[in-house]
Image (cartoon, coloured by chain):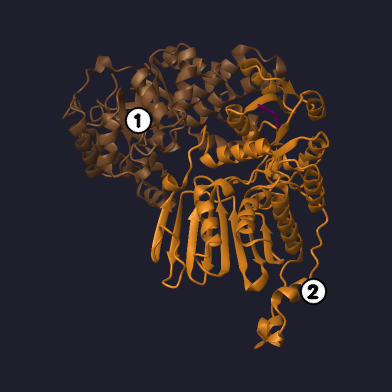
């Protein structure tokens, strides 16, 4: 069962879709790991215990910290989202497509063999490569609770555009088999993605998308999103509910909480006060948002 | 349905392919690349028809248009072939590496009334479009100076194995990053009459430039300064900025926002007020049919498709406009070869004499003094 509020990590890495200036201020504020941990601790204390994060190199340090204090973080759950796209994009510019993949693979030999195989590439090779990349990204979460693993929107939407449907199946199968986790998909094209996931018979999928009152980055249009939420079977996670600050907080939360069938909201915040504020606002509209954190029995949590 | 083929399946080509593949008015009938590995994977998993030979593809695939995203050096030849086959062409930037090719291909496409476009996507970014609208409305009066900047973390060490690290393939920060800034400057203040103080400096690369500075001279005393660096880790990803000073205000814009200061004396556009104004991407961005990596990438593809449907040869980023950017790049390369225009000690002889004291406008002197001596690749 997913928590109703998930804590995002954009603020820690200078990602702000509205202002480069704000992004820089945040980069500065979270330069030291202590500052990240302080806000993450505040989130835990405020009962927001699921950290939906990228596989940025600095998250590895957060993971180390969490592993070092198991009792403090007994309730903390990670929802990793992979890959951290800029890491790859910059590598592609520098080393080319194959060079970049090669750089992030744990075993270069496999990639060399695949390239030599050329056009006669067998299915298991691409599967093997994909699953190795997933494993490389998951290394930092070893020993932590990761019940849902997401594919980031840059990759999801690239695959969607290319009509490379099998990749979703490969990803879903691998995170289930290897990590006992559920696959999640982040997208900017939710209605189109739902069609493909349905076709692939990925049942009741977890899909995270921008869902906000002004329709910002909701490709397919607000009406198609509303229809999907009403009529389709999937577990929706709303992100960018404030549209990077373009919608006043109360108005944004009131609207998103009124949409049917949204399971969770993922939000970012840089201070305890903002986390509490969001939590209090959401609890006004979602009656089932638990007032206090519960402690999950250890056996409930999946081990990697 | 408009039948299109994509050639070049690197970072840009793949994402263009993904976007155009979902466009409701387009059918992608083939993809072409030199890597049989990439083609093999795509053929197997997506069923698309694949080619390793561009000529064969345009000969046999019954196309209306091609989208070219190959290394820059091959653009001119491929565009030439495509135009000979009467195809509309979308090509990644830079357009060509030789101004003579740019002029020849522009004329050839114009003669056939074909739709052409080059991938300067910044002209489809909401905030940069807002700048253009403000300038056209005369909001900041007479423009006196432009500062165009781009920074990002591409080359951070002395290594590099792709065509982007080779000068003769059109690699380097000038073609990759600065071209975008130059193109925006061209959009805002037109074609410069000259360039000065151009430095194409290496930071980590062996044979190409990693950081660039230059001054572009425009009629009536306007200038544009360029400051570009792709070895700047302080920026998480490519960051492009423009600041424009005018007699009645100042505009700053990046991909996310447009900040405008308007003096009391300014012609205040609707929705603006004197003093500071800020418009964010959330209000400046039009929705697109499919989102992959920024609305601007989708919007530029859609613009190309709509122009083909309407048979509109002239449009945003057509070959003629991209050729202007090619010319500026050539001018900057020629300028950089000259090095410093004044050497230490020279100022002593002429002290007290300001440029305007000669009585000849600087741009005329500049024109007389220099003929851009571009001769293909460096």
Magenta stretch in the rendered image: B1-7
Q: Are tags 2 and 1 found on a single chain?
A: no
Q: Quadrant location of the N terminus of chain B?
A: top right
Q: Please say if B163 is above or below B189.
A: above
- In this image, B201 relative to B282: left or right? right
Q: Residue at x 38, y 23 (%)?
A: A227
Q: Between residues B32 and B349, which one lies in front from this camera angle?
A: B32
x then y, percent, for residue B23: 58, 29
Residue underneath mark 2: B368
Q: Please say if B139 is above or below B48.
A: below
Q: Between residues B68 and A173, which one lies in front from this camera angle?
A: B68
x then y, percent, for residue A197: 47, 17
Q: Identify the chain drawn in brown.
A: A
Q: Residue at x 44, y 12 (%)?
A: A177
Q: Identify the chain drawn in orange.
A: B
Query: Which residue is farthest front?
Result: B310
- In this image, B76 relative to A53: left or right? right
Q: Residue at x 39, y 66 (%)?
A: B275
x then y, percent, for residue B293: 53, 37
x then y, percent, for residue A156: 50, 26
Q: Identify the subunit bearing mark 1.
A: A
SS at circle 2: helix
The answer to whether residue B159 is visible is yes
Residue underneath mark 1: A238
Task: Using the image, tell me which numbered label, if any, was put on residue B277.
Answer: none
Q: Residue at x 43, y 59 (%)?
A: B270
């Amino acid at each position: 069962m997913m928590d109703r509020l998930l804590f995002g990590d954009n603020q820690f890495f200078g990602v702000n879709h509205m202002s480069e200036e704000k992004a820089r201020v945040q980069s500065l504020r979270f330069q030291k790991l202590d500052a990240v941990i302080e806000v993450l601790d505040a989130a835990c204390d405020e009962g927001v215990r699921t950290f939906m994060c990228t596989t940025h190199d600095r998250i590895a340090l957060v993971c180390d910290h969490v592993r070092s204090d198991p009792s403090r973080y007994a309730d903390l759950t990670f929802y990793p989202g992979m890959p951290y796209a800029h890491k790859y994009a910059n590598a592609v510019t520098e080393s080319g497509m194959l060079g970049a993949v090669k750089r992030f693979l744990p075993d270069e030999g496999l990639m060399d063999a695949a390239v030599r195989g050329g056009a006669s590439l067998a299915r298991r090779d691409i599967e093997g490569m994909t699953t190795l990349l997933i494993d490389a990204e998951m290394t930092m979460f070893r020993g932590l609770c990761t019940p849902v693993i997401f594919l980031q929107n840059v990759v999801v939407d690239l695959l969607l555009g290319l009509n490379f449907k099998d990749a979703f199946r490969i990803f879903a199968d691998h995170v289930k088999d290897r990590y006992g986790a559920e696959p999640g998909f982040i997208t900017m094209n939710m209605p189109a993605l739902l069609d493909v996931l349905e076709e692939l018979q990925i049942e009741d999928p977890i899909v995270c998308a921008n869902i906000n009152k002004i329709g910002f980055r909701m490709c397919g249009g607000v009406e198609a999103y509303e229809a999907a939420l009403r009529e389709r079977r999937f577990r929706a996670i709303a992100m960018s509910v404030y549209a990077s600050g373009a919608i006043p907080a109360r108005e944004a939360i009131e609207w998103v909480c009124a949409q049917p069938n949204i399971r969770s909201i993922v939000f970012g915040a840089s201070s305890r006060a903002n986390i509490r504020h969001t939590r209090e606002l959401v609890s006004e509209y979602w009656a089932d948002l638990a007032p206090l954190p519960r402690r999950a029995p250890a056996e409930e949590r999946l081990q990697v | 349905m408009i039948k299109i083929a994509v050639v070049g399946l690197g970072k840009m080509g793949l994402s263009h392919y993904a976007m155009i593949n979902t466009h409701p008015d387009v059918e992608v009938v083939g993809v072409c690349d030199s890597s049989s590995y990439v083609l093999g994977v795509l053929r197997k998993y997506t069923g698309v028809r694949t080619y390793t030979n561009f000529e064969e593809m345009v000969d046999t695939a019954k196309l209306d248009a091609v989208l070219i995203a190959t290394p820059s050096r091959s653009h001119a030849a491929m565009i030439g072939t495509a135009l000979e086959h009467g195809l509309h062409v979308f090509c990644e930037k830079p357009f060509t590496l030789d101004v003579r090719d740019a002029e020849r291909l522009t004329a050839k496409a114009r003669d056939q009334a074909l739709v052409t476009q080059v991938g300067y996507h910044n002209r489809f970014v909401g905030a940069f479009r807002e700048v253009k609208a403000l300038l056209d409305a005369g909001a900041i009066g007479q423009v006196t100076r432009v500062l165009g900047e781009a920074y990002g973390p591409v080359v951070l060490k002395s290594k590099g194995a792709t065509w982007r690290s080779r000068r003769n393939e059109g690699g380097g920060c000038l073609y990759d990053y600065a071209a975008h800034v130059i193109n925006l400057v061209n959009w805002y203040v037109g074609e410069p009459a000259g360039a000065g103080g151009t430095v194409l400096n290496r930071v980590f690369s062996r044979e190409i430039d990693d950081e660039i500075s230059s001054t572009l001279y425009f009629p009536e005393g306007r200038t544009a300064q360029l400051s570009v660096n792709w070895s700047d880790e302080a920026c998480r990803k490519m960051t492009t900025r423009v600041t424009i000073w005018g007699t009645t205000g100042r505009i700053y814009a990046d991909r996310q926002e447009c900040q405008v200061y308007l003096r009391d004396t300014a012609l205040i556009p609707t929705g603006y007020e004197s003093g500071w104004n800020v418009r964010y991407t959330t209000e400046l961005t039009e929705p697109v049919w499919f989102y992959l990596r920024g609305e601007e990438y989708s919007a530029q593809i859609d613009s190309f498709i709509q122009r083909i449907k309407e048979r509109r040869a002239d449009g945003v980023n057509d070959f003629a406009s991209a050729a202007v950017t090619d010319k500026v790049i050539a001018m900057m390369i020629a300028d950089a070869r000259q090095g410093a225009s004044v050497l230490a000690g020279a100022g002593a002889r002429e002290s007290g004499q300001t440029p305007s004291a000669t009585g000849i406008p600087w741009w005329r002197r500049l024109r007389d003094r220099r003929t851009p001596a571009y001769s293909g690749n460096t």
